[in-house]
C-alpha cells in the first residue's frame, strides 16, 4: 500500500500554493518519519496563516526529530503564543512540556 503522503503530493502538485494541502503533506511526512521533507511544507503552511497554530507545533516536532533544538524551540514558542491567545489549553500544556525538555 502506498504511503498516504502520495495523495497529498498529488494535491500539492495540482495546487502548490494551497496551505491546507501543504499542511496535510507535512503532517503525513512527519507521521512517516520523513521530518526533513516535512519541514518545507509545514513552514509554508505556517507562513500562509499567522494565526494557525498546528503547523507550528508540527514544525517544531519535525525540527526536534532532526535534533535542531533551536528551530524547534522557536516553532514551539510561536505555537505557544497562539495557543495562549486562542485559549487552546491542551496544546498549551503539550507545548509547555515540550519546551521544558529543550
Image (spheres, rainbow, N blue to C red):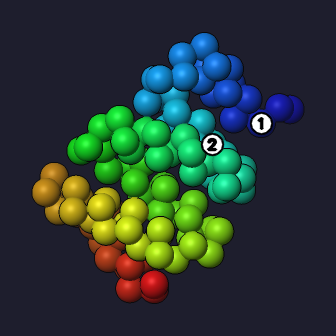
Q: Which residue is mark 1?
A: 3
Quadrant of residue 7 within the rendered picture? top right
Quadrant of residue 84 within the rendered picture? bottom left
Q: Is 67 rendered above or below residue 61?
A: below
Q: Is 99 rendered above or below residue 54?
A: below
User: Residue drawn 42% across and 58% down?
Assistant: 57
Q: Nearer the viewer, residue 18 or 1?
A: 18
Mark 1 lies on a secondary structure that is loop
Judge left or right: residue 33 versus residue 19.
right
User: Residue drawn 47% across and 47% down?
Assistant: 43
Q: Which residue is mark 2?
A: 28
Q: Nearer the viewer, residue 48 or 26?
A: 48
Quarter of the image with the C terminus in it:
bottom left
Q: Is 66 rendered above or below residue 46?
A: below
- Percent from the top left, x then y, of residue 41? 55, 41
Checking the image for residue 57, the label placed there is none
User: Residue drawn 43% across and 39% down?
Assistant: 45
Judge left or right: residue 25 versus residue 86.
right
User: Residue drawn 47% across and 23% down?
Assistant: 17
Q: Is 89 rendered above or below residue 21?
A: below
Circle 2 residues within 10 Å: few <14, some 14–19, many ≥20: many
Mark 2 lies on a secondary structure that is helix
- Is disc 2 in contact with disc 1, using a CB cutoff of under 8 Å? yes
Amino acid at each position: 500500500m502506498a504511503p498516504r503522503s502520495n495523495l497529498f503530493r498529488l494535491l500539492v502538485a495540482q495546487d502548490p500554493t494551497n496551505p491546507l494541502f501543504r499542511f496535510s503533506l507535512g503532517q503525513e511526512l512527519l507521521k512517516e518519519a520523513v521530518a526533513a521533507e516535512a519541514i518545507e511544507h509545514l513552514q509554508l503552511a505556517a507562513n500562509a496563516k499567522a494565526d494557525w497554530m498546528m503547523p507550528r507545533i508540527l514544525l517544531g516536532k519535525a525540527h526536534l526529530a532532526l535534533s535542531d533544538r533551536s528551530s524547534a524551540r522557536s516553532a514551539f514558542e510561536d505555537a505557544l503564543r497562539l495557543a495562549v491567545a486562542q485559549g487552546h489549553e491542551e496544546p498549551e500544556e503539550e507545548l509547555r512540556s515540550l519546551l521544558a525538555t529543550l
